[in-house]
Each structure stands twice: as structure tokens, then as C-alpha cells.
Amino acid sequence: MLTTLDRYVLLKILKTFVPTVLGLCFLFFLAASYSLLRKEELSLAQVMLALPWVVPFLIPYLVPMAFMITLALVYGRLVADNEILAFGSLGIPSRDLGWISLAIGLVLSLGSAWCTSQLLPYCHQKKREALRAVFQQLFNLGEGKHWSRSFPKQGFDLYVQDYKPGELSGIVIHYVLRNDDLASSGEGLTTQLVAKRGKVTLDERGKNLVLILEDVTVTLYLQKMPKGETGAEEAKTPEEIAAALTAEKRDRLAAHEPIRISLERYVQQIGLGGRRRIKPTDRSSADLLAAARRDRSRIHLAALSGGVTTIRQAKRKTALEAEIELGARVILSLASFLIAFLVIPIAFLLKAENALVPFGAAVVATGGLVFAPLLLGRSVAEATGTPALVAIGAVIPIGVGVWLNVWASRR
């Protein structure tokens, strides 16, 4: 049952927390929309489809940050306005003002735990489906003329002169191939394909678009590549063409003379952006726990039966990844509670007349004692192969928080 004091503090927290969360969400929407529109080359309609699945990724970080801002401002203002002193004169210790915030932090941590274990893996899948919509345009061009699109992540540009359902004509593809022999000189093998006609289909697994071209002219020439650019990785056929060039044609390329090759048929695969291997972040916590146990059992069985060492190592690696991801999720979900455990005594100890002072201290404490130990624990666990070391992310803030609370209670 909430007391009058609890309701008073709760009302102050809610009045600050709700607009803070909404403000951070608005800023994130602007940044995410710009990124999807410019970097992912999506249309506005596709961005609207993708954003709902992008927002949950920030919840485990956005909510703790909003909670930190709220606690720092609320308790900083209570101290600055001498309300803490007034409560103390009435025999109400300052720690009684902190229980409601710790309870809220625990509730937010439980919500974050559900989000990281169930919602985010689901959103990973839905986000990939939304982002791959840019490629699905190739199936839905309808009928018309002069369609062009740039695919920067895949490293090529596509132009179609005439199109109608099931048939394309006047196709031009341009990209720069990866070529290790030319990397030192900063040059790339630029390829331009011009086809009279073609069509688009899906491969058997449904993971790649397949562009089938007929009556193709391939033009190869060397050009300087921008620093850091490596070219497309998936265009295998032109690389094979380049590898099969005669010495005379190689000399012509070296002299920056273009080489033209005629092909009756050419097949270009376009990746739809899906991962070849399902990563731990794509799976729910229950699936990760089951997978870790299963891999551990297989490791023991392989060791007892004299299994291949490489198989045991592969299983051990996947089990470690799953266990480290589970530990990191648990620590991250505790962020709101840990922040409350740290920020409240800091505000009481500083006794600042300006509420922005505890706000600055809270930002430093949150970054240095909550998120930094989380990253440190995960890095150490991955480097040593010991998932238990992820707990560093909780041990440090809890230890410092206990010390701060004891110190605050004695003053």
C-alpha cells in the first residue's frame, strides 16, 4: 500500500519520466528515419513499415537513460528546494524517499528483461523482412520506362530502359569488383553489363534475387577507387571472366584500355540482406538456453566418443556465444534498477543547490558504473571464454551502490 509520501514522489517521477521518454523517442524516430531513408535507400512507405520493428531495439537503453534523467532531476530538485531537510525535521529519513524509485526501477527492469528475451529477437526477424522490401521492387515494377536504383551495400547500380511484368529490356548494371591484386595500387576492376533483355526470379532457398540476362556485353576497365572502397563481393561471374583473360587483354587493362566480352547469358545474384548464420541476438532467451544446453551435451558426447576436435570446438564456440548473450541480457535488463541504486544516494550526498549538478553526476555514474562495466564484462567473457565473467557488469555497480547507500545513510 502506497503512503502519502510514496504517492508524492511517484507523481513527481511520472511527471518527468513520461515526457522524457517521449522526447527521446521523438529524437530517435528522426535519426532512424533519416538513416533508413538515406543509408538503406528505402522509400518513405518502406520506412514506415520498418520503424515499428526498429524502435524496440532502443528500449533497453532508452528507458534506463530516461529513468536516470528523471531520478537526477527529481531528487536533485528535492534536495535543492530543501524538501529533504524538511522531511528530516519531521523524522522522515531520506531513505524512505527512495523505496518507490527502487520499486519502479525493478518494474522497468522486468519489462526490459521481457523485451530483450522475447521482443527483440522477433523484431530482428521483422526488421530484416521490412528492409529487404527494397529488392522486392524488382518483382513489382509493373509496366513503364526508365527505372534506376542504386544498391550501395551490394555495390552496384541498376538501370532498366523498358519493363513490364516478367520481362525487362535495356538493362545496365555497373559495379566495381573486389580484386586483391589491385588493392595495393588503389585500383578496382570496374564492370559494366549491358543486356538486351532479362528477368528477375528468386533462388530455390528464397534468400537471393536472381537476375537472368540475355545477349550481354561486358565491359571491363581499371579505375581509381575511393579510399576504403573494396567493391562488390557477390558478383562472381565477372571475376571468373577477369581471371580467364589472356595476357594480351591483361596488358590492355593495365594500360587502362577497356575490354569488351559478349555473353549469350549472364546470371547475377542479389543478396536480400539475410544472415547466413543465425546470431544469438536473433533468438529468444529460452531458445538460447536450450541451444547452450544442447551444445554442451554434444561437446561431452563428442569428447567421450573421440569426436572430431574441430566439431567440438565449433559446438563450444556456439555454446559460449549463447551463454554470453544470455548473461549480457540479464545485466542489461537490470540497468534501470542499478541506475536507481546509484543515482538516489548520489543526489542525497551532493546536497547541491542546483538540480543540474546531480544530473551531471548521474550521467557520469551511469556511463562509468553501469554501461561501461557491462561492455567490459562482455569483452572479458568473450576474450577468456568464461561466460560467468559477464557478471562484472552487475558486480561493479552493485558494489559501488552499496557503498554509496551506506555512506548516504550515515550523513
Image (cartoon, rainbow, N blue to C red):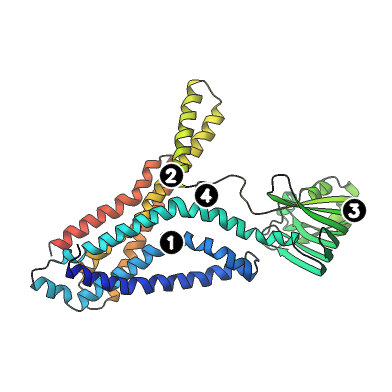
Disc 2 residue type (three-letter)? Ile
Query: From the viewer's perspective, is 390 left or right of 128?
Result: left
| Spot occupied by residue 177 in the image (x, y as percentages of width and height) | 75, 54
Please tell me how crowded label 4 is: few (under 14), some (14-19), or many (20+) other residues with Cα within 10 Å.
some
Q: CA distance from mark 2 to mark 4?
A: 14 Å
User: Which residue matches tag 2?
Assistant: 324
Q: CA distance from mark 4 to mark 1?
A: 16 Å
Disc 4 residue type (three-letter)? Asp
Q: Nearer the viewer, mark 3 or mark 4?
A: 4
User: Which residue matches tag 4?
Assistant: 282
Please tell me how crowded label 3 is: few (under 14), some (14-19), or many (20+) other residues with Cα within 10 Å.
few
Disc 3 residue type (three-letter)? Ile
Q: Nearer the viewer, mark 3 or mark 1?
A: 1
Q: Choose the circle earlier in sequence order: 3 or 4.
A: 3
Above or below: residue 296 compared with residue 216: above
Tell me what residue is drawn at x 37 percent, y 44 percent.
389
Dot 3 falls on a residue whose secondary structure is strand
Q: Choose the circle earlier in sequence order: 3 or 1.
A: 1
Dot 2 falls on a residue whose secondary structure is helix
- Nearer to me, 290 or 337: 290
Q: CA distance from mark 3 to mark 2?
A: 51 Å
| Spot occupied by residue 228 in the image (x, y as percentages of width and height) | 65, 59
Disc 1 residue type (three-letter)? Ile
Please tell me how crowded label 1 is: few (under 14), some (14-19), or many (20+) other residues with Cα within 10 Å.
some
User: Which residue matches tag 1?
Assistant: 59
User: For the C terminus, which image quadrant?
Assistant: bottom left
Q: CA distance from mark 3 to mark 4?
A: 43 Å
Q: Choose the circle earlier in sequence order: 1 or 2.
A: 1
Tell me what residue is drawn at x 30 percent, y 76 percent.
356
Determine which quarter of the picture holds residue 80: bottom left
| Spot occupied by residue 89 in the image (x, y as percentages of width and height) | 8, 73
User: Which residue matches tag 3?
Assistant: 261
